[in-house]
Image (cartoon, rainbow, N blue to C red):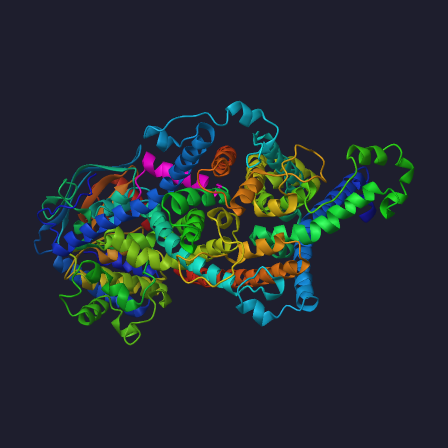
Amino acid sequence: MSSNTTDTSNETESTTDESSTLIETEVSVDSQRSQTPTETVVSATNLSVSYGEQRALSDVSIEIPENKVTAIIGPSGCGKSTFLRSINRMNDRIPSCSVDGELRFKGTNVYADHVDPVALRRTIGQVFQAPNPFPKSIYDNVAYGLRIQGKADDVDLDEAVERALRGAALWDEVDGQLEESGLDLSGGQQQRLCIARAIAPDPEVILMDEPTSALDPVAASKIEDLIDELVSEYTVIIVTHNMQQAARISDKTAVFLTGGELVEFDDTATVFENPADSRVEDYITGKFG
Amino acid sequence: MSTQRGDLFADIDLGREKLINRLFHGLLVAASLFGLVILVLLIADVIWESYQGLTTFNIDPVQFLTEPSSSRAERAGFGASIVASLWLMALTAVLAFAIAVGCAIYLVEYAPETRTTRLIEANLANLAGVPSIVYGLLVLALIVNDAGLGSVILAGAIALALLIVPIIIVASIEAIRAVPSSVRDGSYAMGATTWQTVRQVVLPQAMPGILTGTILALARAIGETAPLIMVGTMLHATRYPSGPLSSFSAMPTQIYNWTYQADRMFNGLAALGIVVLLVFLVVMYALAGYLRKKYETEGSITNV
Amino acid sequence: MSTEPQSGSGISGDDSLEDAHEKNKRVRRVLFGCATVTVVTTVAIFLVLFDNAASYFFGARISEMIAGGGIERTVTFTEFFTGTRWAPDHSTPAHGVLPIVWGTLAITIGAGLVSIPIGTATALYLSEYANTETRNKLKPLLEVLAGIPTIVYGYFAVSFLTPVVVGGIASNIINPTGAWLESVSFLAPFVIEPVAEWMMGVRVGRYSLLAGILVVGTMTIPMVSSISEDAMQAVPDDLRNGAYALGATKYQVSLRIVLPAAVSGIFASYILALSRAIGETMAVTLAAGFNANLTANPFDEIMTMTAYLVSMARGTSAVGTVEYQSLFAVGLLLFLMTLSMNLLNDRMKRRFQEEYR
């Protein structure tokens, strides 16, 4: 059903032959996977977020399924990233930020008084827009989460680092040079290192904030392939400004429009081919068609 | 064509304005050179007087560098003062560094937007403007006399540490703020606490900048004379200091005492002392510059 | 939003998380302690200076008064602030602080007359006229000037400025046949002789006000030039371009656009330089001397407040003597003077920041 979309994307974006066939197979897998019933892992009810007087997110209600890729798209300034950051409470770091409504992670309202944002962030990983490896060795970058979370003694650290790097499809490229600085890698490798860093402590959800926007198309397609593999173990919520990307990699798509409003949330194929809201259709066709 | 263009601007006479501009330019160049001329004169004067000291008064460089001072010019050396200054610097660095960096970390990474925070920040600017001699008075009253520590190296180090703590704080704040917030976000998103983030991510990256600031602050402290005089340093460093609780005369105070003497030979000794002091300063500035350069190139890689 | 660490169902913290939070809290307290050290220092300066200065005026420290010590007027405020002789350590003591306050002010004003025009001109040259290459060479050299310890300037005053520069000026004024005055010697009866007479015979001794002014003025040039230049660099280029597009010369842009736009930043640099001149100690002590004269003659020896502090500390004044107590009265006055300059500077800086935000 989404083969149409995939074709369009292959035409518009001149990816290599190899990657386009990958995307073909991906899509078929995706449509199969979306058949199986799943549980909700993150749900928002009337969630509003403001920065001082400025409202960034208004009355968002959404239920994000487990072990799926959920894409969040929309024009700049629509609150996509704000929504993402409100899931792991990274918005707490902005002093003027205030939150109303509920955001539940596995049934617990993460804004309840008794919830510790530090604990929350240990179960939800995040990958940022620009790769932000720490100025440490590749090994120390990946081991960082396990170390600060006090798990370094309980596991075989070398093994965990290797597993995470393999999971991030970086192992073959960095094997034997783990003591070199993470900053010496290329941009695409740095971003995969950040993904390895995020999955090393084995979180339940991975948030990705436009993870490919700072990368070249080849590096971006590697990340996309990787997301497709990650979703077998993790729930992935990805913000992207690239609608082809959303169509290629996601099972569900949420469309935010200016004012921080969630206007449509459905299976990706439905959103792109048969949106219920005419504004969504305008937005998608305006840029996509 | 060309004649026409000439006619077009013929009625605009810029001669006077151009003259004023050139005169003004000359005036500014002359003013800018003033500072340089003084610098050259100062260095030439010190070198000339040192040369005089070595030739006319036959000061033996080895004796100068190793012997303690004496009230008799021909037996006076700078060795005890050099050692006293090294003691002072080491103690000052130990006393000032941890407190200053701790304060900077608190202000950048922890401090809530409260009145206390604003008070601490406003107070920093004020402290940096307090004359150095006032720190000497404070230590004289509180540490030397009320606490009964006496005029020892430790008391001098406390005065110098109080003096440079604000300088190190300001430099450290700058270095810590220069760490990109994306790196902090990366750490917080992993579920790190503030201290884990600071300790493991922020400090390693800010450390070259903090060290540069600390070295520059110590370079300021090593030449400070007035606070040491207030603390009650010895007139002449006639013996080597035995430790932090020993009386002393550091390099700048010894230079002061020699400069103050009427005997011309003492002036030669003072000039040689200044050469030694300036060598220390050059080494410290070079070290700071090296660290800064290394830091800058590393910084550019971070901003991918 | 509460950030208190407590485990919630579903998002439970384990022991290691508790440990991490506990450690974070402990570190936070320690770091806050570090931050308060700076405030404690300021408070201590105030308390110690007031406490000890009190014994100069009242014969007992404030702490002793609280403990029930007797008060006995030793030095009256009237004598302190209006007396014109300063000799607390003399056998017939006098406690008029005016001569040393005057000494400080004379040095400060004189140094300002040197450093403000030269520093501002240097800043204008660096910011508006110099090309990048010149600028990159000149700026570090000026920074060297700022990095030289004050004791070295003091030595320079003793070994060069006083004998060569001040001595040269003085001998030319006393003796109108001096080379550079020969051509204008017809003016001698009208100008030079009266001036020399007014100075009542110039004797250039070891110390002079002029040497102090020259050395402190030179020391504070880099302060004026670097901070003024920063202020000038902060003036948006749009303003300059607007004026150049109207056909203005560099001279006009410098004086009519850049200077007015950067004025509060420039003034802040002046205040900072003057404040530094007030607190300057070693160079001034070695150049201007230890004699508390109320004089405007640039060739006379004077004493600044800082020089008094040095002269007292250099001698061995025992705790409890009036000399020891007077240190703190003078120190307090000095501190209050620089403090008010710093507060003024702070306000100027804030105003400047508001203008360009």
- Of residues C139 and B123, which is closer to you in this image? B123
The answer to whether residue C336 of the structure is visible from this angle is yes
Magenta-drawn stretch contains B129? yes
Magenta-drawn stretch contains A243? no
- Could you say where residue B170 lies in the image, as x and y percent from the top left? 43, 48
Q: Residue furthest top?
A: C78
- Could you say where residue C283 lies in the image, as x and y percent from the top left? 60, 47
Q: Is C21 displayed left or right of B267 in the figure?
A: left
Residue under the image location 46 percent in, 61 percent down: B86
The answer to whether residue C276 of the structure is visible from this angle is no
Q: Is B283 displayed left or right of A67 in the figure?
A: right
Picture layout, residue A11 above or below residue A161: above
- Of residues B145 and A40, which is closer to you in this image? B145
Q: How many labels does the image show?
A: 0
- Could you say where residue B270 lies in the image, as x and y percent from the top left? 61, 59
Residue under the image location 29 percent in, 67 percent down: A138
Q: Is C244 displayed left or right of A261 in the figure?
A: right
- Could you say where residue A279 lies in the image, as x and y percent from the top left? 27, 40
Location of residue C20 (image quadrant): bottom left
Residue range in magenta is B110-130
